[in-house]
Amino acid sequence: MATIASVGSPSGDGVAAPHPHRRGRFHRVHRFRRFSGALAGITAAALVIRLVYLLGWHHPFSLGGDAYYYSRGANLLVDGHGFPQPYRWFDDGVSTPAAQHPPAYLVALAATSLVGLRSPFAHQLLSCLLGAGTVVVLGLAGRRLAGPAVGLVAAGFVAVYPNFWFNDALLMSETLVQLTVATVVLASLRFWQLRTPGTAVWLGVAVALAALTHAEMILLGPLIALPLCLLARSVTWRRRVGLLVSAAAACVLVLAPWCVYNIVRFEKPVLLTTGLDAALVVSNCPDTYSGEHKGWWSYPCFISIPPPPGDESVQGPVYQAVATDFIRAHRAELPGVVAARVGRLWGVYRPQQQLVLDTIEQREIPASRAALAMFYGLVALSVPGIVLLRRRREPLSPVLAPLVTVTVSAALIYGTTRFRAGAEDSLVLLAAVGSVGLVELARRRRDSPERLRERAGPRR
């Protein structure tokens, strides 16, 4: 009598055929392992590219500007001094509270300082690792968005695109912005597919971490969560509201310690950052409303104002008043200035001049030219990517929200290439969808019955 094991055996040799569910699970695991292996290889190549750039062009590294703030601030934090203004601490020996930038990148760099690796080079190495982490997260986001091929192509773009690896060697917080925004995109896609309180919480946490890196990224919360919940028609309104509340509560809980800390230590209330105040001054003055620097920023405009007394929370309203008075007096010029700011951000207003201006951040012009060319290519591929996602009825808010966020930010202050960092993740994802879609379309046309008959020739 045949055994149960032998009934399903195609060969009748007594070996049971795999259960369909087990067979499907095996193939899924196998495919994921192949994807993981390929992604690991791309990530390793990305890390090598970043290290070559670091060692070849930016070692030893001269600290200045934001890099000085983050590297020196990380060491001060580990030494138990909290978050003082690094410039005042080392130049004047004065301890004054600072929130010129949100704390996330500084805290990340403090991880190496905590184990005794306090040099800028150690911080640069950590930034390279964070940059390689963005390759992994965007690869996973691309896979979840449109399949393994899209994930690997997106990871490949991140590996070689200079506007990603520039920031790692230059100790710019944009390294962490790109990682946290990629995490927001991945969390939002997972939230859309599962729609559980747990995924809503992770989305809120991801948005908070992005906002603790760059304050404007707080806009990702409403720009992503609201559309995803409104479009979830299969979910009751009560559940949609519950998911929104879960995401918002998680975001607030993560932000709360930093906000409370600022409220306690500053003379006047400060939440995420005081950086907007000075930015308004350097971007709203005669130098930035006309001439060659229109839409950019001007440091002479800032230093022309006598430093107000008090800490940053007291100085902020003074800077805001100066900027507001100038804006009111030049209201008619503002639309053209905003257009120039946004144009600089997106590489359509004086792009070659912007490459020269970017050298103030120690970006090399040849690499910047390559980055600009690749940027234009990514934008071109993003258009079919948006069309394909729309046709497949995939959610667009996770990939479009960062584009809107950086555009709003540039319109309010000034435009520069670096400020586009938070949107580069979306560009590579959309471009990956577009490129894979175009390849598939070309393959289908090549293998269509009409093309096959054409290649076979006339029948005899």
Image (cartoon, helix red, strand yellow):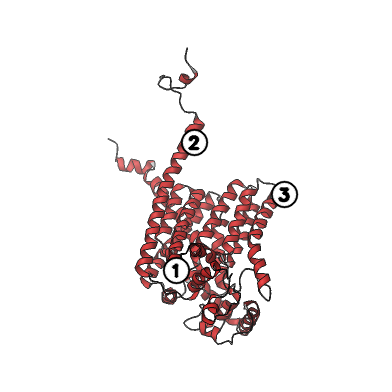
Provide the secondary structure element on which disc 1 rests.
loop
Quarter-wise, where is residue 398 in the image? bottom right
Could you say which is closer to the camera, residue 399 or residue 140?
Answer: 140
Q: Amino acid at mark 2?
A: Arg
Against 374, residue 285 (above or below) is below
Circle 3: is it few (<14), some (14-19), or many (20+) Cα within 10 Å? few
Q: Which element is circle 2 on?
A: helix
Instruction: State the CA–CA distance, disc 3 to disc 1.
Output: 52 Å
Which quarter of the rendering shows the C terminus? top left
Of labels 3 and 1, the one closer to you: 1
Residue 331 percent coordinates (x, y)? 61, 81
Left or right? Give the position of 257 relative to 167.
right
Work out whether residue 227 or residue 225 is closer to the camera in this orientation and state it: 225
Q: Position of residue 137 (x, y in %)?
A: 49, 54
- Indicate left or right for 378 with 74 as reference: left
> Which element type, helix, strand or loop, lies under badge 3?
helix
Residue 238's tag is 3
In the figure, residue 362 lies in which quadrant?
bottom left
* Image position, residue 198 (x, y; %): 63, 49
Question: Which mark is first along the chain, 1 or 3?
Answer: 1
What's the CA distance linking mark 2 and mark 1?
48 Å
Q: Residue at x 65, y 67 (%)?
A: 261
| Mark with earlier residue (2, 1) | 2
Residue 12 in the image, given as x and y percentages of width and height:
41, 19
* Residue under label 2: 25
Tell me which amino acid carries mark 1: Ser
